Amino acid sequence: MELTLRSFTDSDISLMEHWLYLPHIAPWYEHPDDWLNEIRNRHGEFSFLTHLIAEIDGHPIGFCQYYDCFDTKELEDWGVPIHAPKEVYSIDYLIGEPEYLRCGFGKEMIRQMLEMIRGKGAKKVIVQPDKKNEGSNKSLLANGFVWDDNFYVFEMEGTSE
């Protein structure tokens, strides 16, 4: 089974809404209406976010997104200096379909997003999942992220400008 990432489409909105209310997702995505608003406005106000659907053999199993933290510095306090675009990125991700949990697909989603971000010339990726979200934390560590007391940090090597 091979995981692929594809662009999010309008036909994915109802599936995303379903996933956000599932018991294994809801504790980590506390404001589903905010997430859905971002997705619905992904071609306008939130066009700086790259929304993706993770699929296994053409079957959607999860959602992920990445974005340049420079574009969100007015919205979020990252606790790190962000001086210019394409320096620091962040990611979000979820496995929506319960039967695909604990199979390594979250780790693979992160790996593929890191490759996409690397191609943009990023210097680092920072993520701040809930400390109790063991699956997410393990997936980040498995991809080489390091905890720095505030965030998981992945330092890019060999970025292309």
Image (cartoon, rainbow, N blue to C red):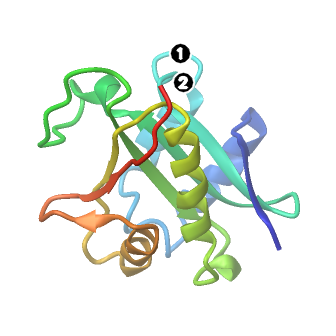
Q: Which type of secondary structure does the marked residue at label 2 adopt?
A: loop
Residue pointed to by mark 1: 44
Q: Which mark is residue 41?
A: 2
Q: Is residue 156 depicted above or below 67 in this figure?
A: below
Contact, mark 2 vs mark 1 (Cβ under 8 Å): yes
Q: Quadrant of residue 89?
A: top left
Q: Disc 2 versus disc 1: distance between alpha carbons? A: 5 Å
Residue 155: percent from the left, percent from the top? 33, 51
Residue at left offset 52%, top offset 21% = 47
Quadrant into which the N terminus falls: bottom right
Horizontal arrangement in the rendering, residue 52 relative to residue 57 (left or right): left
Q: Is residue 9 depicted above or below 20 in this figure?
A: above
Horizontal arrangement in the rendering, residue 109 relative to residue 58 (left or right): left
Q: Identify the amino acid type marked 1.
A: Gly
The one of 108 and 130 positioned closer to us in this rendering = 108
The one of 39 and 3 positioned closer to us in this rendering = 3
- Mark 1 crowdedness (10 Å alpha carbons): few <14, some 14-19, many ≥20: few
Residue at left offset 54%, top offset 24% = 41
Q: Quadrant of residue 140?
A: bottom left
Residue at left offset 12%, top offset 65% = 149
Residue at the far top: name it.
44
Horizontal arrangement in the rendering, residue 4 relative to residue 156 (left or right): right
Q: Identify the amino acid type marked 2.
A: Asn
Q: Is residue 88 depicted above or below 73 in this figure?
A: below
